[in-house]
Image (cartoon, helix red, strand yellow):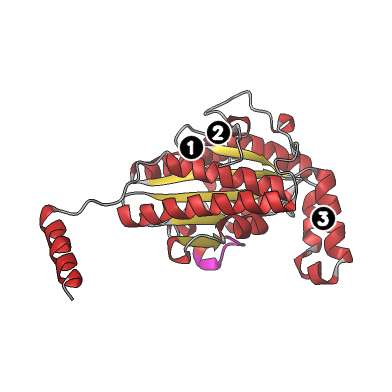
Amino acid sequence: MKLKLDLDAYRVPAKNKHFKLSKAPTKVKDLYKDAAHYDSLLREFRTEINDLQQMMFAHNRYGALFIFQAMDAAGKDGTIQHVMSGINPEGVEVHSFKQPSLEELDHDYLWRSSRKMPPRGRIGIFNRSYYEEVLICKVHPDIILEHQRLPAETTLDMDKLFAKRYEDIANFETYAHRNGIHVVKFMLHVSKSEQKKRFLERIDTPSKNWKFNAGDVTERGHWDEYMVAYEDAIKATATHKCPWYVVPADDKKNMRLIVSAAILAELKTLSLHWPRLPKDQRAQLAKSKETLLAE
């Protein structure tokens, strides 16, 4: 691999009480020389990720879940598309989580996500996730009070409610890891000025008008509150085994390369190997080879 990255610059240390999102960069020096170099690097990452996913599928002891969270227009969809497009589609499952349905609201808040967890042998991608329950719900607690149908005693102290949710989420991810599903979270960290630029581009470009939602501008008014919510969630749920990466997102190419490098590095931490067949099956392979060669 031509690109050498210090991923520790983006990986949040486990249980780091001193982590400050405001100190995390939204832009870094270009990691690529030009468009051709960028394309070459991305292809290399895709090839290596695909090779490991194929081994994961055959090994069938591990799976991986990559969660993408970000403010609007940070580039979640494009990053998922560009990074994972070279992977065998049989080995990747992508799920986007929108506003909960009535059925989902009748269950605990992790229910709809747990149903979409990847099986062993596959990579799962969550475009947004159960982290919305400590992000948008923290910025707008009325969502919980008016729609989530919780027992009244659990909503008397909202600080305690969110502390318990952090604990539940961390336990859920640890449980997944213990059962072979490696959970990695990405916060695509875009600046407020870059988000404004991208919103205006969506308004001014007819082919991008469909991406724009007036409600996104309303949510932009809660920017500072969202930054606090992200910082609190990341600090509470970043662990050694289920890490958070805060990825500079003002330059989409840099962002995709960093995400690709992190995904590859995390897959390499798994004890993957090609299955070794039992002795009788290896003997059958040898016999089949002899038959084919004798034709």
Contact between marks 3 and 1 (CB within 8 A): the answer is: no
Is residue 157 visible to the viewer in this orientation of the structure? no
Select label 3 or label 1 by which is in front.
3
Sooner in the amino-acid sequence: mark 3 or mark 2? 3
Determine the secondary structure under disc 2.
helix
Is residue 123 or residue 41 the one in the foreground? Answer: 41
Rendered location of residue 56, percent (x, y)? 37, 52
Can you identify the residue that label 3 sits on?
198
Q: Decide: few, some or many residues near mark 1? Use Cα within 10 Å; few <14, some 14-19, many ≥20.
A: few
Q: Quadrant of residue 22?
A: top right
Is residue 250 visible to the viewer in this orientation of the structure? yes
In the image, taking residue 75 as reference, residue 177 lies left or right, namely left
Contact between marks 2 and 1 (CB within 8 A): the answer is: yes
In the rendering, which numbered label is found on residue 236? 2
In the rendering, which numbered label is found on residue 167? 1
In the rendering, which numbered label is found on residue 184? none
Kindly report the distance in space between the C-alpha atoms of the residues bearing marks 3 and 1.
Answer: 35 Å
Residue plotted at (58% across, 60% down): 97
